[in-house]
Image (spheres, rainbow, N blue to C red):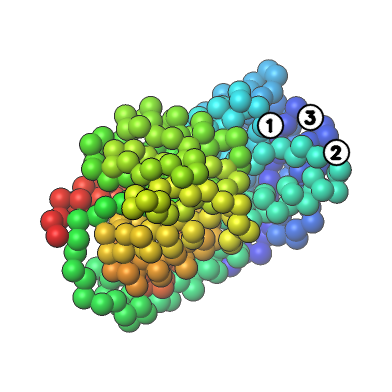
Amino acid sequence: MSSDPIRVLIVDDSAVIRGLISRALEQDPEIIVAGTAMNGECALSWMKSHPVDVVILDVEMPVMDGLTALKEIQKRFTNIPVIMASGLTSKGAETTVKALSLGAVGCVAKPQTASAAESIRVLSQELVMMIKGVGSKSTALKKTISDTENNVTTQNKTKNHETKTKTLFSKNIKFYKQPEVLVIGTSTGGPKALAELLPKIPIDLPIPILIVQHMPPGFTEILAAHIQKDSGRTTVEAKHNEPLEPLKTYVAPGGSHLLIGERDGQKVTLINQDPPEHFCRPSVNPLFRSAAEHFGNATLAVMLTGMGEDGIEGSFDIARSGGTIIAQDEASSVVWGMPAAVVGSGLADKVLPLNEIATEIRSHCLVRA
């Protein structure tokens, strides 16, 4: 396995931001800043003659903006992942969410603090893991996937997945119940995966859908609007103590955990500021745990593309309660981290490519108790 560092190109019209991101990344020996550019046009010209593994791309730039540059990078350099960097403006957030739905693998908010040291700390915490997750030479991620593959057969061998995983987590005999809630967890690559999955789910699916997508504050309300436009189903950024409605989709607000609770005999959404889990807030864990608690074996969960292992503890709770878990397969995932953790622990009832998950969801929702 190659130990070459991951080569990163930083594209931003601000020399200050380029410098902060460079300093944040250069602290990690597995990453090297291969180059910088002040706009999309300069970046494309640079990329013609320099190898690069990951591009960090500003959203708003003169000459050629980030969205235009993203489309050109995807056209000319098809295998290079792009991470969007955005200021916390409504225009920047809107453009960033659109870029994510087009295939940018993740996003980070530009630092707002005047302290250079704090900015570097925050950028390092957010960017390093993401770059290692999507970089083609990430030894940390590849080792995680390799270890998982020692326990389970990977893509295109779903039946073997299911056979082997039974020895890892011993499930009780399932008494299938028609799902009463659908919970979805995702991270890196999630917005594009959601844009593909959710329009294939019937608008009149008679259960609430709750989604945790790792995303900064200020972006998730726009993500909800995009999901509603794509799927045709009423979609909102979840609020505290909001009654769960059967034909509605709820997105966890950036910076807060989303849970399911109960008030006066009715299921409601709960929002809190409890500590991050797996360095994430929102985290998939609180949602999955609360779904297991309040819906038991009527829980249908889907784990989509994402780095790390967020949601693994909540997935154990769903499995113990008799709920059903579908995991996205490696081949169709941008990063096979969160789904791999579920599969490797023997928790997945199905391991499917993204384009087959909606059909599986529809199939489960037709099962009668």
- Check disc 2: other Cα within 10 Å, few if <14, some if 14-19, many if 20+: few
Residue for badge 1: 87
- Picture quadrant where residue 30 is located: bottom right
* Residue 101 location (% of width, % of height): 46, 35
For the point 34% across and 38% down, the residue is 248
- Picture quadrant where residue 115 is located: top right
- Check disc 1: other Cα within 10 Å, few if <14, some if 14-19, many if 20+: some
Rounded to the nearest angstrom, the CA distance separating label 1 from label 2 is 14 Å
Seen from the viewer's position, the closer of residues 261 and 167 is 261
* Residue 21 location (% of width, % of height): 76, 43
Work out which residue is located at the far left of the displayed protein and give it.
Answer: 368
Q: Quadrant of the N terminus?
A: bottom right
Residue 341 in sight from this viewpoint: yes
- Left or right for 363, reference 25: left
- Check disc 3: other Cα within 10 Å, few if <14, some if 14-19, many if 20+: few
- Left or right for 33, reference 41: right
For the point 37% across and 79% down, the residue is 168
Q: Quadrant of the C terminus?
A: bottom left
Q: Nearer the viewer, mark 3 or mark 1?
A: 1
Rounded to the nearest angstrom, the CA distance separating label 3 from label 1 is 12 Å
- Left or right for 237, reference 184: right
The label number, if any, that marks residue 14 in the structure image: 3
Residue 78 in sight from this viewpoint: no
Q: Secondary structure at mark 1?
A: loop
Q: Secondary structure at mark 2?
A: loop
* Residue 161 location (% of width, % of height): 31, 70
Kind of residue indicated by mark 2: Ala
Tell which circle, 1 or 2, labels the residue nearer the N-terminal end: 1
Residue for badge 2: 114
Work out which residue is located at the far front of the displayed protein and give it.
Answer: 264
* Residue 147 location (% of width, % of height): 49, 73
Up-down relation of residue 51 to residue 173 (above or below): above
